[in-house]
């Protein structure tokens, strides 16, 4: 790969060493204390570079949020670099998917989604500081602690920072082959609970009303709403019910994930879910939930920002492609506000949320270069 001599030089070995330090701190979203161990480290490293730090305490069991602002660029609208430090992985995943390099693949829990990308944002800032460079616009690096469960406490802060920005750069992982994200589906989540009537399954079966039977019918209806042609997917991801095998089950509960391509379809699907009624009149059914992240399409501002990034990538020596994805991120919030947002600027790799999660070592240098050049050239 060619490298323009005017570009800041970066060191993939150094980048990977930094990522390793973050990956070795396990950060399950639900364990705020563990997440804060990494927050402490990130805050200290950012402060050492001269950034002005705002640390917002977490709540509801989630970790803290860190906003770090560069010491240059003035007070006007600038660039928001948006990352999260939590992962879906429980404690112990590091033992199952140990940090190791095998050829171009480097393994570890959360290394792809998204500690690799989160570290690239920090690395770009550090590289600018130590090479004596600044950026035309002020830059805020925002590290949140609970993106993997929908950013319930950080959404307000994300939207606040986005309204102060001209551009948002999201360090979520790249898509296959290093593609960046220029549009995302919206996400919704629902909880559905059924309550029937308990009875002995042998002696008085006819007196019972099965909550599981009711929920089974609801699940088939929900799954049937998936329509790939419309870009709608429904997924019943969790289920709990019953007590023991010889009792007609009185309770059953499910959790549902919904993905939609447009706000209009989102409103339609939310109304459908909230209007669900029980098939059995003797069973009670409750549905709660709604849209969690709004969908966003590639508008003129995003298109222009992508073309700028595409040109920078060509200078560095690689072709950049944009893609729409069904996955949600905090970029949904910022793009829905009309702020030009580029997502998927993190590392390339595969296996997010799995026990074989990995990044590609070959992506570290070009992705870091791209982040540095975006910070240097956006005006």
Image (spheres, helix red, strand yellow):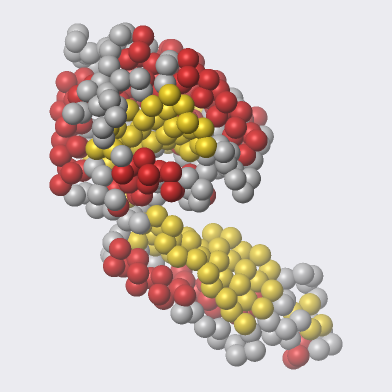
Of residue 16 and residue 156, the one placed in the foreground of this image is 156
User: In this rendering, does residue 362 appear at all?
Assistant: no
Q: Is residue 44 above or below residue 211?
A: above
Quadrant where the image shows the C terminus: top left
Q: Is residue 290 left or right of residue 253?
A: left
Q: Is residue 221 above or below residue 113?
A: below
Residue 138 x/y as whole percent? 29, 27
Residue 81 x/y as whole percent? 35, 33
Residue 194 x/y as whole percent? 62, 76
Q: Is residue 302 above or below residue 135?
A: below
Quadrant where the image shows the N terminus: top left
Q: Residue at x 20, y 28 (%)?
A: 378
Q: How many marks?
A: 0
Q: Residue furthest right?
A: 203
User: In this rendering, does residue 260 appear at all?
Assistant: yes
Toward which corner of the image does residue 161 lie, by quadrant?
top left
Residue 277 x/y as whole percent? 52, 83
Q: Residue furthest front?
A: 75
Q: Residue at x 72, y 71 (%)?
A: 242
Q: Is residue 138 above or below residue 325?
A: above
Q: Residue at x 66, y 65 (%)?
A: 240
């Amino acid at each position: 790969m060619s490298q323009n001599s005017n570009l800041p030089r970066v060191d993939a070995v150094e980048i990977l060493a930094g990522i390793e330090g973050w990956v070795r701190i396990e950060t399950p979203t639900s364990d705020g204390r563990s997440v804060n161990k990494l927050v402490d480290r990130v805050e200290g490293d950012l402060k050492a570079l001269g950034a002005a730090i705002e640390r917002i305490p977490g709540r509801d069991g989630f970790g803290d949020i860190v906003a770090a602002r560069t010491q240059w660029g003035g007070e006007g609208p600038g660039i928001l670099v948006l990352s999260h430090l939590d992962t879906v992985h429980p404690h112990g995943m590091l033992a199952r998917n140990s940090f190791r390099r095998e050829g171009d693949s480097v393994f570890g829990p959360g290394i792809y989604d998204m500690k690799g990308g989160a570290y690239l944002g920090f690395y770009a800032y550090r590289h600018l500081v130590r090479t004596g460079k600044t950026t035309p616009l002020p830059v805020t690096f925002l590290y949140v602690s609970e993106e993997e469960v929908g950013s319930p406490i950080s959404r307000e802060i994300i939207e606040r920072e986005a309204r102060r920005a001209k551009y948002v750069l999201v360090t979520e992982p790249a898509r296959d082959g290093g593609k960046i994200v220029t549009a995302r589906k919206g996400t919704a989540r629902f909880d559905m609970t059924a309550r029937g009537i308990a009875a002995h399954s042998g002696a008085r079966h006819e007196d019972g009303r099965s909550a599981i039977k009711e929920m089974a019918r609801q699940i088939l209806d929900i799954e049937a709403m998936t329509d790939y042609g419309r870009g709608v997917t429904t997924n019943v991801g969790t289920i709990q019910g019953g007590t023991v095998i010889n009792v007609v089950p009185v309770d059953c509960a499910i959790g549902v994930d919904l993905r939609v391509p447009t706000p209009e379809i989102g409103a339609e699907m939310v109304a459908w879910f909230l209007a669900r009624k029980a098939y059995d009149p003797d069973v009670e059914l409750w549905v709660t939930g709604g849209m969690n992240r709004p969908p966003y399409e590639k508008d003129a501002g995003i298109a222009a920002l992508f073309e700028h990034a595409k040109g920078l990538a060509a200078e560095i020596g690689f072709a950049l492609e944009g893609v729409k994805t069904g996955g949600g991120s905090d970029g949904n919030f910022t793009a829905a506000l009309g702020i030009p947002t580029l997502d998927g600027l993190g590392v390339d790799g595969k296996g997010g949320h799995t026990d074989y999660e990995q990044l590609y070592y070959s992506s570290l240098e070009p992705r870091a270069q791209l982040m540095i050049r975006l910070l240097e050239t956006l005006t």
